[in-house]
Amino acid sequence: MTITITAFERSPDGGKGLARDTRVRWALEEVGQPYDVRLVSFAAMKAPDHLRLHPFGQIPTYEEGGLALFETGAIVLHIAQHYPGLLPQEDDARARAIMWMFAALNTVEPPILELMTVRIIEHDKPWSAERLPLVMDRIRTRLDQLSARLGEADWLDGAFSAGDLMMVSVLLRLRMSGLLDEYPRLAAYVARGEVRPAYQRAFAAQLAINAPPG
Amino acid sequence: MTITITAFERSPDGGKGLARDTRVRWALEEVGQPYDVRLVSFAAMKAPDHLRLHPFGQIPTYEEGGLALFETGAIVLHIAQHYPGLLPQEDDARARAIMWMFAALNTVEPPILELMTVRIIEHDKPWSAERLPLVMDRIRTRLDQLSARLGEADWLDGAFSAGDLMMVSVLLRLRMSGLLDEYPRLAAYVARGEVRPAYQRAFAAQLAINAPPG
């Protein structure tokens, strides 16, 4: 069955790979599944056709036969549960890999998204400059804890898993802020993710759309 | 095997059921699994023993035999995947129920947590009053979309599932704000969750700890 995902017709990040379709592309590349991409404009994302597929009017979505999913976490988990390569076989190790997916999305990413709120959505507000260091410190709390847990290991729990895929993707959002450079272990962890051939292919695929060669 | 979860020795909400252990208790009640509770003080949550179990120093955690998990979403999903009662049998319907868990935690809850930031963490900041309506409007955007998708249905996708358990739990955080009252369909949806006997037992169990009868 053909897998079709949606992505921005034009990503707001101009091809840095931070749009969430990159996470799904990466997962599909890790498990070696081909996929089609349907590009969606900002206007089309809020139109009834797309809202039937994604009630919150976002990308990515995932269609495969009669199944239609939204939410990047759910899509990556579905891929990981149906194709080998992203989750350990053993039951407890599998539960822990899924745990790290939730930790990436629910504990580490929320303060990072607040950084986007300060820098973009509330950029022109009078409190923006004064709020920034507060938000940065909330991110540092999470990075301190994550770095302590990772220690000298290559990945969060044994071999590379969907949990690492999600955590690396979330941490990549911090590159521009300079925060990642304060945590050499985490910077090296992200770099290990980025050099994976599957990540490289996913990144190149989104770049081809967002920054087509002149 | 005995299941042991952790909860606040004294919840900051004084027993309103908003601490995340209530979500895990509810899931365990829905599937009819007994569990033990270990109470943790704020100081103990940041101590090495607890950090080994939960690297981000929070509650709840879940221990069962050799398995130790943190992250409420991962714990509820683990329970739902191992005991019948919270996920449909059919593959695609199961993926969609899990999708709603992620939607609750990653799309609906983040703006609601920003409300806690405004009201509690940044309560004494000069921008707090001016930021509040911006954050409220971001929540309304999600509630508009969620209410449109729910329509006249009782639950988000067929029978009650772990997706509804998580969405109702997230929406319950809004009760005090008055925002839920602007959405009669969502208020009725939350009420349907609250009257479930399993929720009632979970709520009573956390209340017994947090507001013991004088």
Image: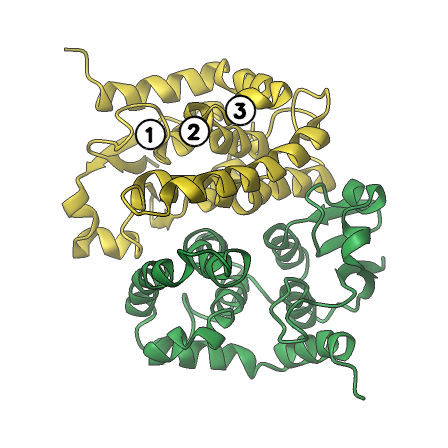
Chain colours: A green, B yellow
Q: Are marks 2 and 1 in contact (CB under 8 Å)?
A: yes
Q: How many marks?
A: 3
**Percent x, y of residue B52:** 25, 57
Q: Earlier in the sequence, mark 3 or mark 2?
A: 2
Q: Residues within 10 Å of mark 1 (few under 14, many from 20)?
A: some
Which amino acid type is marked by label 2?
Answer: Leu
| Same subunit: marks 2 and 1 | yes
| Badge 3: chain ID | B
SS category of the residue bearing label 2: helix
Q: Are marks 1 and 3 in contact (CB under 8 Å)?
A: no
The numbered dot on residue B35 is: 1
SS category of the residue bearing label 3: helix
Cα separation, mark 1 vs mark 3, equals: 32 Å
Q: Quadrant of residue A11?
A: bottom right
Q: Quadrant of residue B26?
A: top left
**Percent x, y of residue B129:** 39, 39
Name the residue at 65% across, 70% down: A26
Q: Nearer the viewer, mark 3 or mark 2?
A: 3
Q: Is residue A94 visible?
A: no
Identify the residue under disc 2.
B28
Q: Earlier in the sequence, mark 1 or mark 3?
A: 1
Cα separation, mark 2 vs mark 1, equals: 8 Å
Of the 4 image quadrants, the one containing the N terminus of chain A is bottom right
Which amino acid type is marked by label 1?
Answer: Tyr
